[in-house]
Image (cartoon, grey):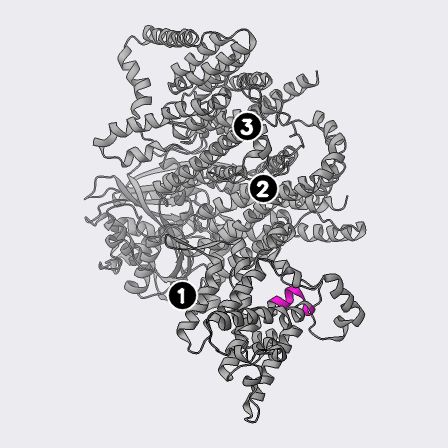
Amino acid sequence: MATPAALPPLPFNPRQVRSYLLRLPLFTRLVLLVILAFWLLELQTIWSVVQWGSLTPDECNLGTMYRLNTFPLIHTGFFHALLNAMALTPLLERFEAEHGTLTSIALFIGPLSTLPAGLYLLIEKMILHSNTPVVGASVWVFLLLGSEAIRTFKTNPYFSVGPYKIPTWTSPLFACVVLSILVSNVSFLGHMCAILVGYVFGLGYLKFLVPPEKVLRWIEGKLNLLGRLPHYVSVDQKTYAAIRNLRNNPNLLFVRLPNLLSLLCIIVGVVWLLLLPLNEYSRHTYISENALLPGQVHAYFSGSEQHIFRGYKQELEGLLSEGQNGIEARDQAQLTPAISTKIQSVLEAAGLKVATQKYQYSSAGITHHGENTYGIIHAPRGDATEAIVLVASWRTANDELNLNGVTLALTLARYFKRWSLWSKDIIFLFTPDSKSGTQAWIDAYHDLHPASVQPLALKSGALQGALVIEYPFEHRFKSLHIVYDGVNGQLPNLDLFNTAVAIAGGQMGFGSNLQEMWEHDDSYEARLQTILRGMAKQGLGYATGAHSSFMPYHIDAITLQPTGEGWEDEMALGRTIESLCRSLNNLLEHLHQSFFFYLLMQSNRFVSIGTYLPSAMLIAGNFTIMAIALWMRTGYHADALSTKTTESAKPKEKSSEKNSDAGKPAEISGPAVAERLLALPLTLVTGLHLLGLVPLWLFNTLPHQFFTLATYAFVAVDIVLPLLLAALLANGSGLTSALVPQQYLLIKSFALLLLGLSLSTLATLNFSLSFMIGLLCAPLSFVSRSHCPSASKRRACASMGLVSLNLLSPPTVLMGVCWYAGVSVEAVLTQAAFGWDVWGMWTQVVIWCVWWPAWLIGCVLLGASIF
Amino acid sequence: MAVDRRKIAVFGAAFVLRLLLVCLFPSLPDLLTGRVEVSTPVNSFKRPIFYFLVDLVNAQALITISESGQSVQTRLHSAMRKHIRWDGVSIAAWFLFSPFTIATCLARSTSVFTTTGILYAVSNAVDGNSINAILALGFASYISLYPALLFVPLMLLCYDRQAQLSKTPNAAVFFLQHGAILLGSVVGLLGFSYLITRNFWEFMSATYGFHLLVPDLTPNVGLWWYFFIEMFDSFREFFLGVFWLHLAAYVGGFTARLRRQPLFIITSLLGVFAIFKPYPSISDASLYFALLPLYRHLFPLMRYTFFAISALLYSSLLGPAFYHLWIYAGSGNANFFYAITLVWSLGLSILLADSIFAALRDEWEQAHPESQGKEVKQI
């Protein structure tokens, strides 16, 4: 029997003290009561209790043998009584809980008082020839400490202090010595005797003194002590046994403890995330790259440039209204060849080198095509090895007409060309839309474009940063909305974002927003909401604007969107961009100083990866913990059962071995670890993960009009397939023999191992996606084949579990989210297929090859309880 | 005939799987060819197809090795748990369906030829064709140099088999004879190379010199590149010597300690090579994993399989992720990837040490039948 190395901690909480006292067992209460009574008695002066009951060697004779039993209950003063009572209570309570009330009474009234007393008398009188009276419960305290120390020694023989190893059984001796030094009037000898008896008791030499259980049970039964006495601890009750037997209790160790740990991991993971918005866990943003010097230069873009802006705008508008009239038609305007020619002529007139690029993508049965126009300002002070990109899409990310944005970019191109201070080339890129145009251009810039995209005729150096300008309305704006999420959750260097915020706030004097949080009051809720919105975008991994396409090439990029009704005009936006370009122009090397992994909760507050990563890792870790526990359990459980099951399973195994494809391990085991039947679980788990390729392929190649249908079909498949597989596994159906419980555990173990593995890897690449999938998969840790003997109950449980798991299946979650967000399933899936084909987005891979198989296996295990 | 059907099924399935992967994901071979985990400066050779067939040939050699029973019953040793074993087809299936093998095959790494050489050397040795075995080893050594270290254990295997099958040959003569054949075969192949290239020393320094002097420090899954990047040039020669000595030292140790199980020496040495050779790739690990199931009877004695395999799985997923963060995303650095290669090597080392422990324990239990199944403590 193992003993906890330390005594239970002192109950400090008053409520805990109360409940502790209320739960004290009977004998402990009696002892405390008697100690109190004797102390009260001692208060009167007529009759000295101490003199009556103390263990005084000279007074002891046959007539006063009672002293050998009374002395532990008597104390010399209040503090003596109080301290002893406090020390005794936990020890005695534990002793009683373990041995029962009757045994405790028998032992403590009898031998455990008289033996130390006798020993003390013997030594004091016969050897030392002195006569020191002793009283107090400390004799029991040391006796119990001694016996506990022996038990600790058995499980935990040494504690090391530096290089020395000290046997744990000496700890009461130390306590005794220290006490004797610190407190006066302490009987060293008395304590030593008590410890000695305690050792002997702990070693089990006094077992013969314990009344036989049979007798105790008989007394208990006859007198119905359990019914009559409150707080009575029966012989059969073993409260501490459960904790002490942890090591010998596989059910607790392998079933309940991992469940608890897993649950704890998930809860801590979620709470961790919720703590992030607090000031203690987040940080102020700061500019890490000194070269940037945001807002340190005067921006000259103003005054006369406004006339040029108006002129360009009028020319473009003129092209719009030709053949089209009405506001609506204008809003639908596409970038026609006429407009493209106009843009080229403006750029050429400003003295830029101009080129165009045609591209075409087809995805989900839709063809996207267009023509990019771009011009390059060659740096007067550079060697064309580095460049900055300014992008203006004809249609914004929200599919609005970006007339002001394009005009502003044209005006800036003419304006920048006249400056001689650029040390990096500046590329002005005009794309027809925000989804595909920049992608085609940036792919071609790095010669990684598909055949349907034209190569670039004109190139510059390595791209250092990109800014996207959007100004899709006519009125003046109030603040700047900065969009920064890239494809697959990649983020630009935080310095770029910080520079934009610093310039907007400091130099230009207007605020900045992020994640569409128009009203941000810096409260906890607002911060959390910002983080969650950022996480949702990052997790889904789609391109949030024209800037997103730059991120996979390690080019930091942001989109600047003016928002709100205010006093700032397009010139203010122009000056912001000028200042940003000047900052980027200062860079001596690629942005690398600041963070690439962060969660922003406000324009000037963030948490970095070191702070937030543990939350996703904890959630991923819960699956791994479970997998390890299940693995150990399969080795352990079968150990006890092996002799029984292997014999009965033998003939079946033999027949199955012929049929099984990958070969089955023989079932005979060594004594330590039971053999695991790995072949089928491994094949099943691998097979189901490969099966995920089917929906992955389907949802990326079907024409878009079938997406809704396919989703419904998959909901149906998700209901039927697990049941089918479960039935197949449970009955064998010729392919293999029916599965044994161990194989179900192994299937779950492998599935969870893979899930935990994938999610923890994913957490380093895309924290949010890993976190979301981890949360959605959290129930899978706790779902398994039920062992309830009653079939009807088992079936009811399994059916309910299946229904609730089906609510968490990938297609159902997709439909739920679409319904909540108010978008059509088809639109989302079309976008996803476009992302897969064009952006190189791999969110789908995670969903179909990590989440779906794990979910499927969870359902199969649950479904197996039905059959 | 049931066994044959299974064999056809496994081989067919393996072939079809590879074909499917290539057809469904036409970009996969090129992607894998570019991966540092698979492709090192000494094994990238971009020629298409027929690698599938090489894999099947390798699997056939594995079946031969397995069916000889040399893993459980050698001339001097008979394992305690002989009955726990997988048949040849299962072992071939392990090899053919191992993701590492598939990746190596699709990446068209020339390591598979070395693998073929080694496997054929072993399979001929267990069949008693010692001359063929040595010729195959000569071929493997000619391609990759390091298989030459397997000469001694392979000789032991041939010697034992010869003694078992016919009569005990004279040890010294036997060794000298076969050493001469190995030397002859390598020299012969080098002669051919000389005839083709005409510039012998340049050829030598570009091939074996490359293996020996490790001039290219492109990252791979091994332990050398990072160490030699960090090294001051003046110490380079010294540590090159130390590293090679370290690699070669295992041959002596294993041979002396595990003399009674020569096939196990070869298996363990292949594990050592997968960890400590200068340009290891996952194909070396796949070869080790291919031979390990021959020792199925030792698995019950191994203690850390689950943790070692978990470490390997974690590193094989995290490795590419961290490489991506370092090279493509630019948000990580070399230490990310290096840390994962350390974990990979750690996983392999645990597996290797654990299997050797199990083999020794097996021998020990044979000597002390009374202690079978009891806890052991190092004394």
Q: Residue furthest bottom?
A: A46
Q: Is the residue B159 above or below the residue A522 in the image?
A: above
Residue at which label 2 appears: A848
Q: Quadrant of the N terminus of chain B?
A: top right
- Residue placed at 66% from the left, 71% from the top? A105
Chain of the residue on which disc 1 is drawn? A
Which is nearer the eye, A732 or A403?
Answer: A732
The answer to the question of whether label 3 and label 2 lie on touching residues, with beta carbons closer than 8 A, is: no
Tags 3 and 2 both on a single chain: no
Q: Secondary structure at mark 3?
A: helix
Check disc 2 and give the amino acid type: Trp
Q: In whole angstroms, how far apart are the C-alphas of marks 1 and 2?
A: 38 Å
Magenta stretch holds residue A99: yes
Classified by dominant secondary structure, the portion drawn in magenta counts as helix
Give the image location of residue A204, x and y in percent: 60, 58
Chain of the residue on which disc 2 is drawn? A
Check disc 1 and give the amino acid type: Glu
Q: Which residues are magenta?
A: A95-102
